[in-house]
Amino acid sequence: MTTDQTRLQSLWDHDKAANMSESEKLLYRSNLLGSDKRVTNYGGGNTSAKALETDPLSGEQVEVLWVKGSGGDVGSIKMDGFSTLYMDKLRALKGKYRGVEFEDEMVGFLPHCTFNLNPRAASIDTPLHAYVPKAHVDHMHPDAIIAIAASKDSKAMTQEIFGDDIGWLPWKKPGYELGLWLEKFCLDNPDAKGVVLESHGLFTWADDAHECYELTLEIINKAIAFFEERTADVPAFGGAVHNSMDADARRGVAAKLMPAIRGFVSGQQNMVGNFVDTDTVLEFVNSKDMPALAALGTSCPDHFLRTKICPLVVNFDPAKNNIDAVLEGLEAQIATYREGYAAYYDRCKHDDSPALRDPNAVVYLIPGVGMITFAKDRATARISGEFYVNAINVMRGADAVSEYCGLPEQEAFDIEYWLLEEAKLQRMPKPKSLAGHVALVTGGAGGIGSATAERYLSEGACVMLADINPENLDATYENLSSRFGADVVRKVIMDVTSEDAVAEAFAYTAVEFGGVDILVSNAGIASSAPVEETTLKLWNLNMDILSTGYFLVSREAFKMMRTQDMGGSIVFVASKNGLAASPNASAYCTAKASEIHLARCLALEGAEAGIRVNVVNPDAVLRGSKIWEGDWLDQRAGTYGTDKDGLEEMYRNRSMLKLSVLPEDIAEAAYFFASDQSAKSTGNIVNVDAGNVQAFTR
């Protein structure tokens, strides 16, 4: 690679920053630094600025620390993401400090230092910024720096690369004591520009925002250059012992593994998966040293808080493609990991430690295939994967030039089960009702399908939109992903009458999300013709889509749900016409009746596995529905002797409640059957038709 490709480039725009306040420059600098994952990972690191502000009570100028608040991300932070604290009060805190044994109690004093009633909670790293006697401070987690920090001889390496510009401090858990260490280092080394924290990251500082930004880039680039020079001819991780399978084969293995793993690890809550098979990951999982390095665990606290102490290496051999044997032994392998994690907890716990958390692995490494991560939601699973890629980069550098060192087990435990970290977890909002659930919606680009997808997304589910119309599917995907986030929405072109297409769509869903909990079978067609004018082709088309298509997607859902062994919910969107005959629609009505009876049959078969199958029967949902476009609308209007504009009014007046039925009404019923509100319901039908006596179930 050329220097331009591998070095960080300055993105600072002097014209843009010219009229900014110090706090605005802090935000600008933070966003620039966080925009490149080589500088810091998501949520990792923090930035600060000390600036003069007008005290709202006295009207006098006071020194205020602006510092990234608890739980924020520098790349996406806004002004309200920063905590603000009086510097004179932060300095006064030194008089309250009773020593390292009591340092955690200092967090309780931080709210008393708040400036201007700022509600943003201050993070545990606040003292690390407050006591550095410089106006601007960056604390970043660059892979190249952590590779130095996690090396056996990190102190000597820091001196070799940076000289006296950058100092070194031994490992110390973040907190008040480390803040005092940093202050002492700065006072003892007034010409130093920063410090490497062993097994942690980088601090840099300056009295000018732009100077601080440029310094941070300069130091990281020096580290990158050092590793490029020293590792150019060194095989990564001891060289390869496995070859990667081709891309389709890798995804095929992941599609089989992920629902199985998901079933084993979702005991406490439904988990969502993420699959990564980038060159970086494949180089690591295929290497000779991977098992030993993986067992050492990660080093940087941010890494193992997201990835647990170490990953699980799946017993897969890409040369043999022994996936069946792996699946057969997977339960035992996962149980062994749990036992090991519980033993780690028992070895390291203190009298006041929080209770043992989920003992399952977060990261799964598969030789020849890639990496799988599971977490409580899709974004967390993805970010956990990103953090382990950071750890891979760290291990590559440290292992090539020195000896990689994970954190000592007890130190790792004390971070993972830190009471302050537990308090942060307890403050997290209650999960939404469908959090961790994955839904596949056929006919997902239509009015009912998109409304149902939106309802599920609003309750925390991940949704795979399946439809046969590419243009409508793209538009629906763009709409929903822009509103709910790209992590939780996927799309797939699927013809429900094709066995291969259906199987491929479910495999794709497994790779993207880990499995399927909810199937909404909603793909539709509508036709209208007197029986003597109903061709065999038209009859078969209705049967293929509305009966056979519902069978094919349900069969595939059953396979995946049985593999997961987590139960599931299948919702058929049928029609009032499946219960009540309608003139000039024999093919449509018969296919819908078949659909309803199929649901009853599947409810019988699925009950022992906790798979519930229920039916929503709409009537006359015109708004947004694709089946009401074109000939069907003309035909039904002709059947009832009205025009297009009068058809919806006719249906409304025909109903007992004199109400129009909208896609959102069907979506609400589909949500009910997908949620725990209907946990004791299967084989049922809910009519959402504004009242139609002919469709009363009997």
Image (cartoon, rainbow, N blue to C red):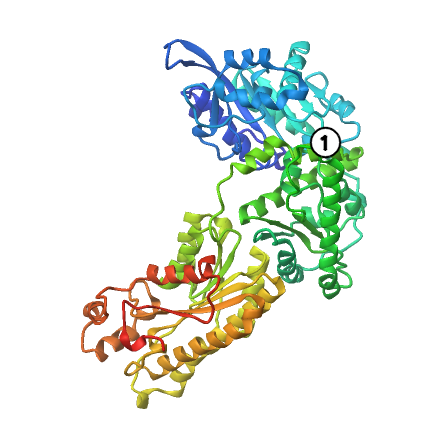
Task: Please say if 56 is above or below 409.
Answer: above
- Quadrant for the C terminus, please: bottom left
Closer-to-camera residue (85/365): 85
Apparent side of residue 641 relative to residue 228 in the rendered image (left or right): left
* Residue occupied by mark 1: 411
Task: Please say if 620 is above or below 309.
Answer: below
Task: Please say if 588 is above or below 213.
Answer: below
Residue 549 placed where, x, y %? 47, 74
* Residue in the picture at 31% in, 80% down: 528
Apparent side of residue 193 relative to residue 616 in the rendered image (left or right): right
Apparent side of residue 645 relative to residue 193 in the rendered image (left or right): left
Local secondary structure at mark 1: helix
Number of numbered discs present? 1
Q: Residue furthest front?
A: 351
Residue 550 placed where, x, y %? 47, 73
Residue 639 placed where, x, y %? 23, 80
Q: Residue furthest bottom?
A: 532
* Residue in the picture at 44% in, 11% down: 62
* Residue in the picture at 41% in, 48% down: 483
Visible residue check, residue 340:
yes
Apparent side of residue 497 relative to residue 244 in the rendered image (left or right): left
Closer-to-camera residue (17/566): 566
Quarter occupied by residue 57: top left
Closer-to-camera residue (177/192): 177
Closer-to-camera residue (300/263): 263
- Quadrant for the N terminus, please: top right
Q: Pointer 1: residues within 10 angstroms few (<14), some, or many (20+)?
A: some
Callout 1 amino acid: Glu
Residue 631 placed where, x, y %? 29, 75
Visible residue check, residue 445:
no
